[in-house]
């Protein structure tokens, strides 16, 4: 079973016991967090559930291992023939997470989700659009 979630404008594919590094979120070392922005879930029965945009009733339980600064990224600016050189560095704050569990409630089975999407698509097909007729004034 794996899931794809969104955090900090990026998407991460994770499974149980994965350790990953994400952009800093508001948490402390040793704290358990709940990630609810699940975009995709593939369970052990080879069923794939895709959210629109997120899947309800599915969340990931993770534990914060550490809150650290990432490796330094060097920025070197130069303009030729003007004796202009600048060397800057940046260290991004990151959180190291360990995925403990991907929690799926029984309500979010694929069959129920597919039924809901089929009903929505049928309703969309039945809706009709009426074009307004253009009237022309002959009195001009």
Image (cartoon, rainbow, N blue to C red):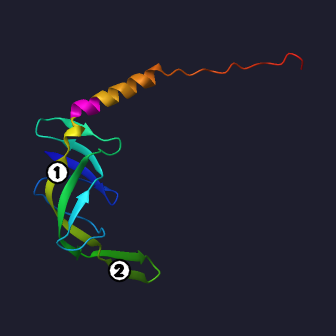
Instruction: Check disc 1: other Cα within 10 Å, few if <14, some if 14-19, many if 20+.
Output: many
State the image coordinates of residue 2 (x, y, percent, origin top left): 16, 47
Q: How many marks?
A: 2
Residue 41, placed above or below residue 79: above
Q: Viewer-nearest of labels 2 and 1?
A: 1
State the image coordinates of residue 58 (x, y, percent, origin top left): 24, 47
Q: Are marks 2 and 1 in contact (CB under 8 Å)?
A: no
Q: Position of 100 compared to 84: left or right?
A: left
Name the residue that disc number 2 marks: 88
Nearer the observer, 70 or 39: 39
Region of the chain picked out in magenta, as a range: 110-114
State the image coordinates of residue 45 (x, y, percent, origin top left): 11, 35
Name the residue that disc number 1 marks: 102
Q: Position of 37 compared to 84: left or right?
A: left
Q: Main secondary structure of the magenta part?
A: helix
Residue 45 drawn in magenta: no
State the image coordinates of residue 10 (x, y, percent, origin top left): 31, 56
Q: Residue at x 23, y 69 (%)?
A: 95
Q: Residue at x 28, y 33 (%)?
A: 113
- Dot 2: what SS? strand
Nearer the observer, 122 or 95: 122
Cα–Cα gap, marks 2 and 1: 40 Å
Residue 116, placed above or below residue 41: above
Residue 8, placed above or below residue 111: below
- Dot 1: what SS? strand
**Residue 1 placement: quadrant:** top left
Q: Quadrant of the C terminus?
A: top right
**Residue 92 placement: quadrant:** bottom left
Q: Position of 69 compared to 18: left or right?
A: right
Q: Residue at x 43, y 24 (%)?
A: 123
Instruction: Check disc 2: other Cα within 10 Å, few if <14, some if 14-19, many if 20+.
Output: few
Q: Residue at x 21, y 43 (%)?
A: 41
């Amino acid at each position: 079973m794996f899931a794809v979630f969104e955090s900090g404008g990026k998407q991460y594919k994770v499974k149980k016991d994965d350790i990953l590094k994400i952009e800093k979120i508001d948490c402390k070392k040793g704290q358990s967090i709940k990630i609810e922005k699940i975009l995709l879930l593939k369970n052990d029965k080879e069923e794939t559930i895709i959210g629109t945009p997120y899947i309800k009733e599915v969340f990931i339980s993770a534990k914060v291992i550490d809150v650290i600064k990432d490796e330094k990224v060097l920025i070197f600016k130069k303009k030729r023939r003007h004796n202009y050189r600048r060397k800057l560095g940046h260290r991004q704050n990151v959180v190291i997470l360990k995925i403990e569990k991907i929690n799926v409630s029984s309500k979010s089975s694929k069959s129920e989700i597919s039924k809901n999407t089929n009903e929505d698509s049928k309703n969309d097909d039945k809706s009709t659009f009426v074009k307004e007729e253009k009237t022309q004034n002959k009195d001009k």
